[in-house]
Image (spheres, helix red, strand yellow):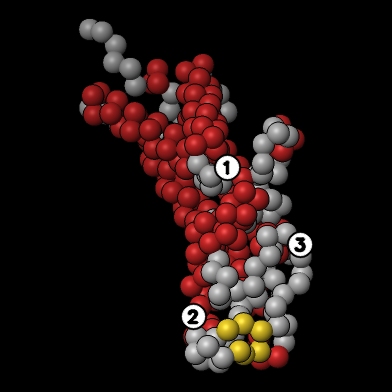
Amino acid sequence: MNLSANSIGFIAGVFMIALICWYIRTLIESNPEPFFLSFTFFAFAGQFIRLAEVTSGMIKERRMFDGWGTMVFCVSIGGLLVFAQKRVMNGHRWITKHHYKTVLSTGLVETNNLTREKRLLVVDSWSEVLLRITDVDLFPRGYAWLKRWFPEKEEPKERSREFALTVLPRQEFVVSDGDDESALNFVVADGGEKSQLNNGKQPKPITVNKLEVPPTLKRHLLWWAYVAVCVLSWVLFVGTMSIVEPQHFVTTSR
């Protein structure tokens, strides 16, 4: 694989733009886009820009360049990798939402007029709200490495989980701002009568720590798939850059 200085500079430029954009978003957004997801998009964008550049040169030269079909194939594979990354992220979203539903179910205040269907609807609705606030909880804690670089900063996912906890309605869920596991045995129902929580079972208070998704084998596999797709997209990007160099389609003066 031979890369010209122009291609190396282009790859480095795309990498630096991706890194700078992502870092700026961490400063202005409470829940920035996942690091490797963002870099996957930029790798595909770099591929597409090079293909557009070569295609423009072909139109100008009015001839087909060797390797253009290969570039189209590589860009198509790059697009498939973007969709593969989407599938991986959907897997992360499903695991995170399922965890939130489990936590919310254990902390739900069940009144006399709350049927099983209503309980499921309440839990599902609020788990979606929490997911929208915190976004996917990657493993192993996708932004934990930032603490080593910037120890004075709070880990973004922890900050979003703290905010998510504040939006839960106290009349529907038993919420603890700390690690306190105490809870009331009774609440006042809509009709003004007292009803036992969770059909006689003490609900478990929802805390910030409980919102963190525990590590599982499936999360390990999804994490490495998430990283691998990003790496493959950049390898494909570099390979695409080496197929047709700019000097191959520069029009010479006549």
Q: Residues within 10 Å of mark 1 (few under 14, many from 20)?
A: some
**Residue 148 in the figure: left or right of residue 80:** right
The image quarter in which residue 112 lies? bottom right
Seen in the picture, residue 133 relative to 44 is either above or below; the reply is below
**Distance (Cα) linking label 3 and label 1:** 30 Å
| Residue type at the position of mark 1 | Phe
**Distance (Cα) linking label 2 and label 1:** 33 Å
Q: Residue at x 53, y 82 (%)?
A: 120
Q: Which mark is residue 179?
A: 3
Of tags 2 and 1, the one toward the viewer is 2
Q: Residues within 10 Å of mark 3 (few under 14, many from 20)?
A: few
Q: Secondary structure at mark 3?
A: loop
Tell me the residue that label 1 is attached to. 35
Q: Secondary structure at mark 1?
A: helix
Q: Nearer the viewer, residue 209 or 99?
A: 209
In this rendering, does residue 118 appear at all?
A: yes
User: x and y percent of residue 20 in the render?
Assistant: 52, 29
Q: How many marks?
A: 3
In this rendering, does residue 224 appear at all?
A: no
The image quarter in which residue 71 lies? top left
Which residue is situated farthest in the front direction here?
192
Q: Quadrant of the C terminus?
A: top left
Q: For the residues labelled 2 and 3, say whether their Cβ atoms are less than 8 Å apart.
A: no
Task: Give whichever of discs 2 and 1 has the lower sequence position.
Answer: 1
Which residue is situated farthest in the top direction here?
254
Q: Nearer the viewer, residue 76 or 166?
A: 166
Q: Residues within 10 Å of mark 2 (few under 14, many from 20)?
A: few
Tell me the residue that label 2 is attached to. 121
User: x and y percent of residue 177 in the render?
Assistant: 68, 60
Seen in the picture, residue 171 relative to 45 is either above or below; the reply is below
